[in-house]
Amino acid sequence: MLSSRTMKTSTSRPVVLCLSGHDPSGGAGLQADIEALLAQGCHAAPTVTALTVQDTVNVADFRVLDRAWVLAQASAVIADLPVAAIKLGMLGSLEMVDTVVQIRQQLPGIPLVCDPVLRAGGGGALGQDEVGYAMRERLFAVSTIATPNLPEARILAELPDGSADQCAEKLLRHIRHLLITGGHGDERQVHNRLYSRDGSRHDFTCQRLPGSYHGSGCTLASTLAGRLALGEELVSAVRSALDYTWRTLRDAERPGHGQYIPRRLPLDFC
């Protein structure tokens, strides 16, 4: 007969290891990861890579944590919990890129979603462009998919005026799948494009919403990691993540003086 403990373990939510920065405004970073993953029915295991000074307007400063502290956090989680997926957000330094590569080696074979965070929604830097290049060269090879917006994709591809197609052509030399998100130009509809190294491509469009949003990229990437942790096939998981993220933006609120924050959980969530 199964014990109550065994019965509980058999129905546990998939665990997603989140390596990202802390945003004290609660709009982006690890809080966004936690909320989005809860909404997918997953358990977030947040490992802090950096502390930031930011609000809903912009980022003022950040400090990357000591490498040993990040390794210790992740190792404690890995030793205790059955991690089903990894989500990467703000890393902030070349040393942290190497740290995450080392952590990845402890969890081979599980899905890894890389959100190459280089800028806050207000435009402030969350790491030098060199950090993005290091992610491209060292992390993309061990990632399942990366989720840059078009400005980030241009930085990563070193194509300042490149189209999404041009950026993808270059970046797919480093990664198997690439989701380049839209919404940063003057397009009337948002075009999100999923590229794969095998030549396949999927386009997803949605209605452009008014206003600007703080934490939309974190929401998308963590949701995608959650869907993959649940066993959803990649294209379907991308579609689910995009649909969910759009709904959080549709229902967003503006608690401060800056951007809107996605509403990732229902008001009656408990």
Image (cartoon, rainbow, N blue to C red):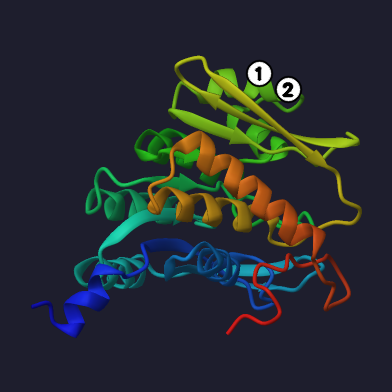
The mark found on residue 37 in the picture is none
Above-or-below relation of 161 to 120: above
Q: Amino acid at mark 2?
A: Ser
Residue 108 visible somewhere in the drawing: yes
Inter-mark Cα distance, 2 to 1:
5 Å
Disc number at residue 163? 2
Residue furthest to the top? 199
Quarter holding residue 82: bottom left
| Residue 119 in view of the camera | no
Residue nearest the observer in this picture, 157 or 251: 251
Marker disc for residue 166:
1
In the image, 219: left or right of 113?
right
Residue at x 60%, y 41% (from the top left corner): 239
Query: In the rendered image, which quarter contains the N terminus?
Result: bottom left
Q: Are marks 2 and 1 in contact (CB under 8 Å)?
A: yes
Kindly state the secondary structure of the residue where label 2 is placed.
loop
Mark 1 surroundings: few (<14), some (14-19) or many (≥20) residues within 10 A: some
Front residue of 135/19: it is 19
**Looking at the picture, which amino acid does disc 1 mark?**
Gln
Which residue corresponds to the image point at 73% horizontal and 52% vertical from the top-left?
A: 246
Give the secondary structure at mark 1: helix
Total numbered badges shown on the rendered structure: 2
Q: Position of residue 159 (x, y in %)?
A: 68, 24
Screen quadrant of the C terminus: bottom right
Left or right: where does residue 180 sit relative to residue 177?
right
Q: x, y (%) of residue 189? A: 85, 36
The quadrant in which residue 261 appears is bottom right
Q: Position of residue 35 (x, y in %)?
A: 57, 70
Measured as percent of width and height from the top left, residue 116 is found at 56, 46
Residue drawn at 51 percent across, 64 percent down? 37
